[in-house]
Amino acid sequence: MRILFLHPTINRKADEAKKRFLERFSSEQIIIDFMSLDKGPAHMDLYCHEVMAGPEIIKKVIWANRNGYNAIVIDCFMEPGLHPAREVSKVPVIGPFESSISLALQLGHKFSVLSFLDNAVPQVERQVRSYGVESRLASIRTISTPVLEFGYDTTQVKNEVLKESRVAIENDRAEVIVLGCTLLFGLADDLMKNAGVPVIDPLLASFKMAESIVTIGLPLSKKYLYKKPYRLR
Amino acid sequence: MRILFLHPTINRKADEAKKRFLERFSSEQIIIDFMSLDKGPAHMDLYCHEVMAGPEIIKKVIWANRNGYNAIVIDCFMEPGLHPAREVSKVPVIGPFESSISLALQLGHKFSVLSFLDNAVPQVERQVRSYGVESRLASIRTISTPVLEFGYDTTQVKNEVLKESRVAIENDRAEVIVLGCTLLFGLADDLMKNAGVPVIDPLLASFKMAESIVTIGLPLSKKYLYKKPYRLR
Amino acid sequence: MRILFLHPTINRKADEAKKRFLERFSSEQIIIDFMSLDKGPAHMDLYCHEVMAGPEIIKKVIWANRNGYNAIVIDCFMEPGLHPAREVSKVPVIGPFESSISLALQLGHKFSVLSFLDNAVPQVERQVRSYGVESRLASIRTISTPVLEFGYDTTQVKNEVLKESRVAIENDRAEVIVLGCTLLFGLADDLMKNAGVPVIDPLLASFKMAESIVTIGLPLSKKYLYKKPYRLR
Amino acid sequence: MRILFLHPTINRKADEAKKRFLERFSSEQIIIDFMSLDKGPAHMDLYCHEVMAGPEIIKKVIWANRNGYNAIVIDCFMEPGLHPAREVSKVPVIGPFESSISLALQLGHKFSVLSFLDNAVPQVERQVRSYGVESRLASIRTISTPVLEFGYDTTQVKNEVLKESRVAIENDRAEVIVLGCTLLFGLADDLMKNAGVPVIDPLLASFKMAESIVTIGLPLSKKYLYKKPYRLR
Amino acid sequence: MRILFLHPTINRKADEAKKRFLERFSSEQIIIDFMSLDKGPAHMDLYCHEVMAGPEIIKKVIWANRNGYNAIVIDCFMEPGLHPAREVSKVPVIGPFESSISLALQLGHKFSVLSFLDNAVPQVERQVRSYGVESRLASIRTISTPVLEFGYDTTQVKNEVLKESRVAIENDRAEVIVLGCTLLFGLADDLMKNAGVPVIDPLLASFKMAESIVTIGLPLSKKYLYKKPYRLR
Amino acid sequence: MRILFLHPTINRKADEAKKRFLERFSSEQIIIDFMSLDKGPAHMDLYCHEVMAGPEIIKKVIWANRNGYNAIVIDCFMEPGLHPAREVSKVPVIGPFESSISLALQLGHKFSVLSFLDNAVPQVERQVRSYGVESRLASIRTISTPVLEFGYDTTQVKNEVLKESRVAIENDRAEVIVLGCTLLFGLADDLMKNAGVPVIDPLLASFKMAESIVTIGLPLSKKYLYKKPYRLR
């Protein structure tokens, strides 16, 4: 089984570390590849970054379909290009937000999402509502330390995430915390011990979801929403 | 007042006719310009067409802001790039879907949208839900004649729209019909006479909405969702 | 084009000032008339005030239809009699709440309504839900200074509105503010400068909405909800 | 205990028969009075009929509060004036729609409402949504025989109701039928035997609800929505 | 008329006091019996308590159907076994939560539920949503004093309920308070005087609801959800 | 990793075949055990069957926690005892309905559930709504052939499922089909080829979900809803 993690920016600094992290949860039969964009945005915080990354994402998804990948993960919590990618793809295209929420729903009644910038709050709210699970959302909370680059101060971020998680748990009655960025990979275990509730790592969630869907042999539905384009340019 | 209609494909055949149509509802003080993309998709039916058009839309929106336009209309019912465009724009960015629904809500209890391809049904449903007005939607119905090119057979399309409108009115209890494509401009009056309920022309709706918002002097909210990008590439 | 603003109380003190305010946003082709009730309530704060105003509203709406008006605006944010008026009217009947919300939805993700009395909060909430846009509502907040009479202390009201708007923006994540009373006409520009988000003037919103609908030539739907009364007494 | 049934039209033909019907389900301690309007509409099918009846309803409700009634029932399924009446009343004001739905929710999963005219469908839908129970509604269906006057053809109406109930049960998966007019009193038992599911008589439902609320000693909440008018005219 | 109150624990200490309380609101024609479980949980706070009580509840409900009861009330706000009991019962099975909410909806716009343990908050929220009235819920608030045994400190509980009710009223804009435990019977009148809004006693609410449904002659719907088991073991 | 499949009836005929089926999708590191109830219902079609199975399910879940299982799957689409089991369990408890829906949401816009008996329709609808994903449900459809016993006529069932799936796809616009019974294991691949959309096998879905959650190391949230019972009997 071959899974492509497509990181929708030009920044590839974290790729190796992400790969090593995921391989701890993988088996020999699974090949995990990471790929970033040749051109596109350096960050992914805004809808206009999604737009800038869009055409490259589509190209890479088509390429991955032609090169034997069994599933493609959009390696960003905002899942830019997820729905258009599913139009041009035969193999499943998986998003870390969708995967994380799907796990969260099975571990407690309400989940909170921890995110970064102010504009992320309505973005995540729109994403939750588009997925259809708004009645299970406790809150969306933000931390102010930017993790825009791999190599961010892990301790500071963990402390802030922990602090906001506790507010989410006590004030908003969150029972599960979803980390709102795939760059936060590898922190969930520590956070879980301190927060006392499940903490979802979106990168890991999307990997196991992709693996499950490929193992079961489930395809994307090409009826209606993700209908194959009759004429792709 | 200067309003830019940005058509998100490379096809500019209908621009002149659209402009003449809108000027019938305009005044001397308003300059209406139409602009298509330099490169991008020839049609706009799928999410991946939106992706292909995205970067050019953003460029044109930035250009329009720098060149004195008071409002920008994304000239397509699917409103590709609407939300990212609002991030990079100071002046209001208007979408024909949003404008049409806003008018429809004030004329009757439930509206139906008439669209074309099969995949459009879940797309429009997602759009309605994203706008938040799903409880006012009667149905989404499709006609099979393609209007992919200006110069389509008007009579045949009108007959089909009329037939499906009547089904929407009688079976789905629609009280208002929204035409789901800006290429259908200029047909509403005739359809209205035959269908017996209001029929919304999305091109005209977006023009009057843009004019109103500019006249009142309402800006886009740059707080939260449409926050100005701190670093735009 | 002739538009009638029907103020649903016996109080006509603000009529002249409202008319002058709207004419700043109008053209020569549009005649704006204001009319109050011959008998009815002095204020419009409660459902029972709506009841007291109801029969007179219906009479005036029928009169306006017979006297060449192209649209009728119910000049009160609570829109008393809006739905029954649409039953007896051929021409569009417009409400400031509906018009304001329709504009707000196009300028930001969530809106807050600023209102006055305690009982207004559930009233506005019911109105928002009846319109179907509850998922876009950030909050309803009240100010305590009464503006029951034209000639109220503008500065004090602006200060209080500004204070509550800031709470709505910071705490409730409102991106657009809707003023919950047509007597607050003419304050939005100043408030907007200070609040930093769009502020909707409901009187002006309803005027531009009426003008747009008349210009486009859209009628009320007389199918189902606003069906013509078979026997009106 | 004294309960006033306030019929919101000028038609009092059915009053005696309704009273005799309700007394079959009552005890000696309860006095049931029926009262119609002195002036107002002859029928109650449209929102504008509600408007015409409104001021008289308010007057009668105030009168009933001053004359020792313990509860007031608005004797019409559309419940005209229910919310404004609650503002001016100290004693509970009960509506047949609300009472019927409250019983229906406890007898099966989904209910259908049987109504008459075409315009009633969106009206009832708005009422269901305003009450907040739209997720429990199976359907709203209409019969074409008018029961505008007491003395209507009972057999024909029963047959039509039965026919539409069966469609609601088989097609819409209704488990409980709510009769959408208080003039249909006394038919539920027969219909129930034939339809095989509970059929709610709205007149009787509102009577037992009023009796229960008075016996328990529950007042209207005068906080927020039904706040006492500070100055009633 | 005979009504069985089935208390779903093995604790029968409060039975006599509950019976005497209800008889104050009853008439000679009604026989009220209380019954506890022969084996099962001592408390009812968790879903697993419901499970432990389940089989005994079903047995008692079948027994009550064979022994001439006209209605059965599950005497616990959590209503354990309500839906399965309705499958095996011919006579109505009533729950205090459903009865209380049904009354609350008719007395004010929004209600709050007062409950005890932390885990009760999501439980009650799920119950409210399952009943379909989530848009009418103001909040769920907890008090920390346990009332696990009859003979609890009434004064302390009343003070705490009052304190939390006031928070619900002022902060959450609750207009009606629902007591979230049938052991709180008999406190509503006092609380109502102090809180200034209606306070619903769930035991009394369920009694009057059962009485009304039996008097009207309404059966459970045995179509679809509560279909009679074809083979009961 | 050890996963216990707990089948909530006394019927163990399918256990061996299910185990062999799942092992085709498993690895050597995973031990799959199947266990049925010592006493309880023979079928699981009604809420009262859930009740009868309840106490045994709790006992087995506690047993499994003490005997080294890393996750427990309730082997029935109705997921009887899922929520109470999570209260008494430290290790994740997984349900086939929740797992199936979670996968379905990532493969297409709307899903339909195929079920058996008439009463299953409102049951499944309540389950979907309790999970919070009602806006993604296309329809619930039933087939009439009973699969109450392993050894049912596979060909006939496949034909009926295929027929109803096609109705769900064409009429209800389903994009993904969820099989509503774990006894239908092993049929999805064949059905998928014929139906042309993804078909979810709930047994397999729950297995891969359990495996993912255990591999990631995610616990149940013991905060609020699934709080550990302070005193379990």
Image (cartoon, coloured by chain):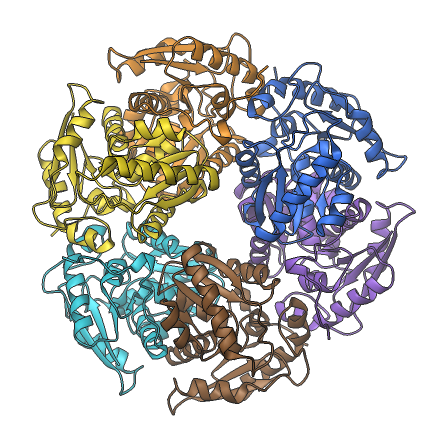
Chain colours: A yellow, B cyan, C brown, D purple, E blue, F orange
Q: Quadrant of the C terminus of chain F?
A: top right
Q: Quadrant of the N terminus of chain F?
A: top left
Left or right of residue B122: residue D31 = right
Residue C69, image x, y percentages: 50, 86
Question: Which residue is located at x 24 percent, y 10 percent?
Answer: F28
Give the camera-side residue of E24 and A91: E24
Left or right of residue B56: residue C207 = right
Judge whether residue E12 can be spotted in this image.
Answer: yes
Left or right of residue F110: residue E101 = right
Residue D42, image x, y percentages: 73, 70
Q: Is residue D166 above or below residue B154?
A: above
Mark count = 0
Give the camera-side residue of A191 and A218: A191
Question: Which residue is located at x 20 percent, y 71 percent?
Answer: B65
Judge whether residue B106 can be spotted in this image.
Answer: no
Left or right of residue D18: residue C115 = left
Question: Which residue is located at x 15 percent, y 63 percent?
Answer: B59
Residue extending farthest bottom: C28
Residue D58, image quadrant: bottom right
Question: Which residue is located at x 65 percent, y 44 percent?
Answer: E163
Residue E67, image x, y percentages: 79, 21
Residue D103, image x, y percentages: 68, 43
Q: Is residue A91 above or below residue B77?
A: above
Residue E201, image quadrant: top right
Q: Is residue F95 above or below residue D107?
A: above
Q: Is residue C228 above or below residue B84?
A: below
